[in-house]
Amino acid sequence: MAYENIIVEKREHVALIRLNRPKALNALNSALMRELGDALVKADADEDVGAIVITGSEKAFAAGADIKEMRPKSFVDVYREDFITSEWEAVTRVRKPVIAAVAGYALGGGCELAMMCDFILAADTAKFGQPEINLGVMPGAGGTQRLTRFVGKSTAMEMNLTGRFMDAAEAERKGLVSRIVPADELVEEAVATASKIADKAPYAVMATKEAVNRAYETTLAEGVRFERRMFHALFATEDQKEGMDAFVEKRTAQFRGQ
Ligand SMILES: CC(C)(O)CC(=O)SCCNC(=O)CCNC(=O)[C@H](O)C(C)(C)COP(=O)(O)OP(=O)(O)OC[C@H]1O[C@@H](n2cnc3c(N)ncnc32)[C@H](O)[C@@H]1OP(=O)(O)O
């Protein structure tokens, strides 16, 4: 598939995906979401890729679903298409870690896309929000659910009901983003972080991601049991031997994904 709305680069075992509709502040239309889904499936299958970064531009990670594309749709259209379609959730099906590197606006579907990633690195210019209420609708891709889990009911309710934006400092304080970096270092820092993950034992990385995500979907007791079983399973890998041998031999581990 040829891409017109995203740019994909490979760097140091990292797939860097840039959303690229600058004139529309990376508004997420169906073509862009199809291309993003395709790029994610390919990066997930690529044995030379250990982690993925999704980013936008300096001004906008993404200003939400494309309002101009959405505007003429009827109830029957959105219900039949099941809009937001499963293409929007492609990122949640990726088994490798996905980092959202957010500068500028991450609004509506843009904020929802960032929250579907495994963690968010924010530039000091980042602004998050769920302004769908101003359009006479409400979030349709997780804004009422994921945002509430990240920042708690009170802040999520206020943001969803008023459309207020949250700046990077508040997002860090409330746990929406893992950390803030200067805007001109954002992409390099995200790629360096992803590359650090890509150097680790891939099955340990995959199992860790699965276990952390389980914390959102199950009870504590079930989650801890799941974690223990995944921990046990990693003793079936050569990388467990290599990691522990390397520690004892005081050298850097060379993981081979076996
Ligand atoms: C996924 C769901 C189900 O949850 C639904 C959604 O995501 S609904 C969308 C939610 N997002 C918004 O409501 C944000 C809309 N955008 C804005 O409020 C502003 O553009 C801004 C505050 C992000 C930036 O303002 P400003 O700097 O003044 O730039 P603009 O002139 O407004 O925008 C430049 C250019 O981009 C087009 N644009 C911006 N956002 C969208 C969008 N979401 N969809 C389509 N097009 C968008 C905007 O129309 C401008 O283009 P032109 O009209 O000048 O051609």
Image: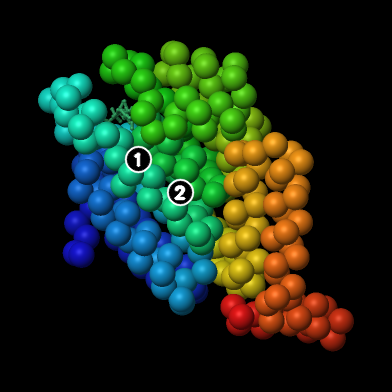
Residue for point 76% across, 56% down = 228
Q: Which mark is residue 159?
A: none
> Residue drawn 75% across and 50% down?
225
SS category of the residue bearing label 1: strand
Q: Is residue 54 above or below residue 244?
A: above
Residue type beneath disc 2: Thr
x%, y% of residue 234?
Answer: 70, 69
In which image quadrant can residue 107 be found? top left
Measured as percent of width and height from the top left, residue 27 is found at 27, 39
Nearest the eye: 151 or 213: 213
Q: Is mark 1 within 8 Å of ligand 1?
A: no
Total numbered labels: 2
Disc 2 Cβ-to-ligand 1 distance below 8 Å: no
Estimate the x, y position of residue 116 in percent, counting from the top left: 47, 43
Q: Which residue is mark 1?
A: 62
CB of mark 2 within 8 Å of CB of mark 1?
Answer: no
Q: Is residue 150 above or below residue 40?
A: above
Q: Residues within 10 Å of mark 2 (few under 14, many from 20)?
A: some
Quadrant the C terminus occupies: bottom right
Viewport quadrant of the N terminus: bottom left
Q: CA distance from mark 2 to mark 1?
A: 18 Å
Taking the image in four quarters, ligand 1 sits in the one at top left
Q: Residue at x 58, y 36 (%)?
A: 176
- Say which element carries label 2: helix
Q: Earlier in the sequence, mark 2 or mark 1?
A: 1
Q: How is the image coloured?
A: rainbow
Residue receiving disc 2: 92
- Is 231 situated left or right of 108 in this image? right
* Residue neighbourhood size for the residue with mark 1, other residues' Cα within 10 Å, grouped as few (<14), some (14–19), many (≥20): many
Q: Residue 75 or 14: which is nearer the viewer?
A: 75
Amino acid type at image mark 1: Ala
When the figure is inspected, residue 161 is found, relative to residue 181, above or below; the finding is above
